[in-house]
Image: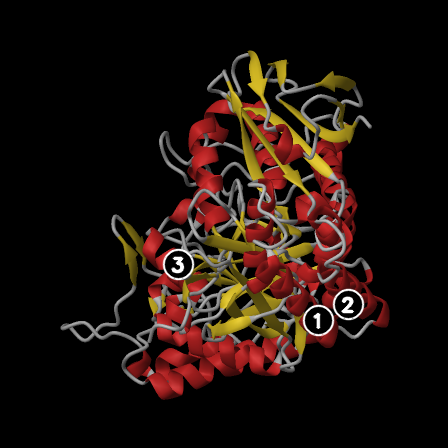
Amino acid sequence: MVGRLGLNSVHPVIEHGALPAYAAVGEHVVVEATVFREGHDAVAASVVWRSPKGKAAGFNRLSPLGGGTDRWRTEVVPTSPGLWSFQIEAWSDPLGTWYHAIEVKVDAGQSADELANDLETGAQLFERVAAQVRNKADAKLALAAAADLRRTEADVPLRITRALSHEVRDLAYRNPVRELLTNSPSYEIWVDRARALYGSWYEFFPRSIGAELSGDPADPTRPVRHGTFADATQHLDYVHDLGFDVVYLPPIHPIGKVNRKGPNNTLNAKPTDTGSPWAIGSDEGGHDAIHPELGTEADFAAFVARARELELEVALDLALQCAPDHPWVAKHPEWFTTLPDGSIAYAENPPKKYQDIYPLNFDNDPKALYAEALRVTLLWAGRGVRIFRVDNPHTKPLDFWQWLIAAVKKKYPDVLFLAEAFTRPAMMHELARIGFTQSYTYFTWRNAAWELQQYGEELVGAAHYMIPNFFPNTPDILNEFLVQGGRPAFAIRAVLASMMSPTYGIYSGFELFENTPVRPGSEEYLNSEKYQLRPRDYYGAIDSGNSLAPLIKRLNEIRRSHPSLHHLRNLRFHYSENDSILVFSKKDPDSDDTILVVCSTDPHNTREGWVHLRLDELGVDWSSGFTASDLLSGANYEWGEHNFVRLDPQQPAHIFAIHRHH
């Protein structure tokens, strides 16, 4: 139904309000609406912002965007997790109408007699302002303005001076006279804790830490020693020293023995082959158990406790799929898809085949299967896991995820879910809308400057429901850019991932420049850690200069020190005349902190050219210039709107802190 005033196109709203929009604590959430009315009288708008307890947390006036759009905007900032709500109020603004009319008529030279009604109307409006303010000084000021407007012995300029002063205008703005109030529906925003938006992730396989291989030419991958949680707990110091916030573990459950895969995804596994952690379940247990070679529940608890001591959070893989010998297969065959020949269907993504994995069929016995999935998730949450990286959520029903996430958050509101859904855009975005906290993205395949800018702007446009997590590599994905670009490519991707997105991550081996594919053109690693142990000498690589760890540590230090990098909605791009140089900035909405990044996207050649900056996005006055302090090299530059840069593969990026001239 149409209201008394025009009010529509409210933002942020998902599915006409059927689903809540999304934000994290401390985010500046843009609220917009289209507001208009008949005729020429002024309108205005405000937002009533309510906390999860239903208490009004703010009354923010919206500002017009101009340009004849009738579009209005403000920002709200949630201060605690939970389900917040907001409502737009549009209203006729008689004081706005009066200010416009009196100024135009005075400028036209109208006399006091001609302005008599206008002056009295203004006096009555300021009396209404005085009646509704709580501060006595404000009431006194409003009444003084009303009294001046009624001073018939004075000339018009004197009578209107106080009313038109900045002090009274500000008072009137803060205490508006509102008529013909028209309300929008109330809309919801789910607000998660700050880690939902900002954090640096590090992924490693616990079984590879401290592991030893035979090295025998006849059987080089045969495990001599399997890594344990005790080893992984010691490795947390390395992760902490690099400045990461979240340590992410692939599945830690027993691995199926039936159809187990050998090294490089071969079908003829030997008894000593470790298999894929994503082939979950055996006679040793299922999703609620720990692989016995990793250790016990007590060992896992010690791992979580040590992580907390180091201010690291533990993220665990939630992979709802089974090996053929998972206990669920024998106990609940109805949870799987049976083929015409009576066999159970294994997972396929043609031409890839996963004979060691049975997908679950969520339509055969949804009530029981949903309940079991919830039980398993809550069990690990009870063991201290507050972040789940969800494997292939796009292969399960959307309504299942909406139900499961809501059910988990009902008991553990601080739990976060990362969707590993490298899939079509419609599914990826819908998973975010229905409750997933974060999403893997197409960043992994966006390598040219123009496509990185295009994709970055797309993600900013979706920031009211989707938080990206930029991983330049995963155990499944070795991008050709890394294969062909060598060490400079790793540095470029680390800079772009860590600076563009408030949340990013790397899979271990990235810092060691691992980039050999199983075959030319493949995105699979040779000797993939998915199918075998991969012990690494992390500290030896640092000592020999064959590690990206020093740069990664510096990037994480920069991220922690600069709050502008903790946000997504503030990502802005600037223009470079060289199409292989990407220029972007982030300005903190609560401080003067501003970061400007100039990064080559060419790992092979030196790139140079002019870059042209949008100084308003940097908070810099057009006439004053600024000092750009490179946080990587320590050099300082005096910059302005137009600047020349030269980047080479050994130093492919500048990360500037902006210091404004006053």
Amino acid type of disc 2? Leu
Residue at (59, 41) in percent of width and height:
107
Q: Is residue 553 above or below residue 319?
A: above
Q: Which mark is residue 127?
A: 1
Check the image and report above or below for 540 versus 309.
above
Q: Which residue is mark 2?
A: 143
Compared to 91, does 41 lie above or below? above
Residue hosting label 3? 39
In this rendering, position of residue 592 left or right of residue 566: right
Q: Can you say which quadrant of the picture contains the C terminus?
A: top right
Q: Position of residue 334 (x, y in %)?
A: 29, 83
Marked residue nearer the N-terminal end (2 or 3): 3
- Marks 2/1: CA–CA distance: 6 Å
- Disc 1 on helix, strand or loop? helix
- Using the numbered discs, state the Cα–Cα distance from disc 2 to disc 3 in whole angstroms: 30 Å
Q: Is residue 296 above or below residue 122?
A: below
Viewer-closest of 502 and 592 = 592
Marks 1 and 3 sit apart, C-alpha to C-alpha, by 26 Å
> Which kind of residue does numbered mark 1 sit on?
Glu
Q: Are marks 1 and 3 in contact (CB under 8 Å)?
A: no
- Quarter in which the N terminus is drawn: bottom left
Compared across the picture, whether 471 is left or right of 198 comes to left
Label 2 sits on a secondary structure element that is helix
Identify the secondary structure beneath mark 3: loop
Left or right for 38, reference 500: left
